Amino acid sequence: RDLTKVISGLHNTAVAANGLDQSAPAGGPALTATQLADLQTLLEEDDSEAVDRVEELLLGGSDAPSHRLLLSIRESRTAYDFDAALQAVTEFLQGNGSK
């Protein structure tokens, strides 16, 4: 629990130092079905690359629903709750269909 707080604090410090505000969506495009499927596969495999992919997608900008999904996944991954991160992607795919 303490480690999660430290990691989260370090991430927030890094974001602030880089002048990035990832709390608000950038108004970019929705995530594609390919991006979501790739992310889902990485999460299913408990691949640490999923964390990097989420950060890349957040920095790339996305529409509000996609942005909220990515923030949710990042939060789950930071807390080492891989099942919750995978469930978020799966529910998003089921709720929004493939684009």
Image (spheres, rainbow, N blue to C red):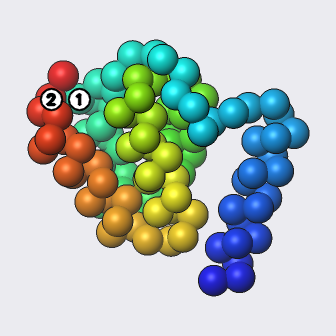
* Residue at the limit of the structure toward the right, as seen here: 17
Identity, as a three-letter code, of the amino acid under mark 1: Ala
Q: Which mark is residue 33?
A: 1
Asked if the residue at tag 1 contacts the one at tag 2, i.e. Cβ–Cβ closer than 8 Å, the answer is yes
- Whether residue 71 is visible here, answered yes or no, is yes
- Whether residue 56 is visible here, answered yes or no, is no
Disc with the residue nearer the chain's start (2 vs 1)? 1
* Residue at the limit of the structure toward the top, as seen here: 28
On the image, the x and y values in percent for residue 17 come to 87, 39
Q: Residue 36: name its quadrant.
A: top left
Answer above or below: position of 52 versus 59. Answer: below
28 and 38: which is toward the camera: 28
Residue that appears at 81% across and 46% down: 14
Q: Which mark is residue 71?
A: none
On the image, the x and y values in percent for residue 74 come to 51, 53
Answer above or below: position of 25 versus 72. Answer: above
On the image, the x and y values in percent for residue 83 come to 33, 69
Cα–Cα span, label 2 and label 1: 5 Å
Residue annotated with mark 2: 98
Image quadrant in which the N terminus is located? bottom right
Marker count (numbered): 2
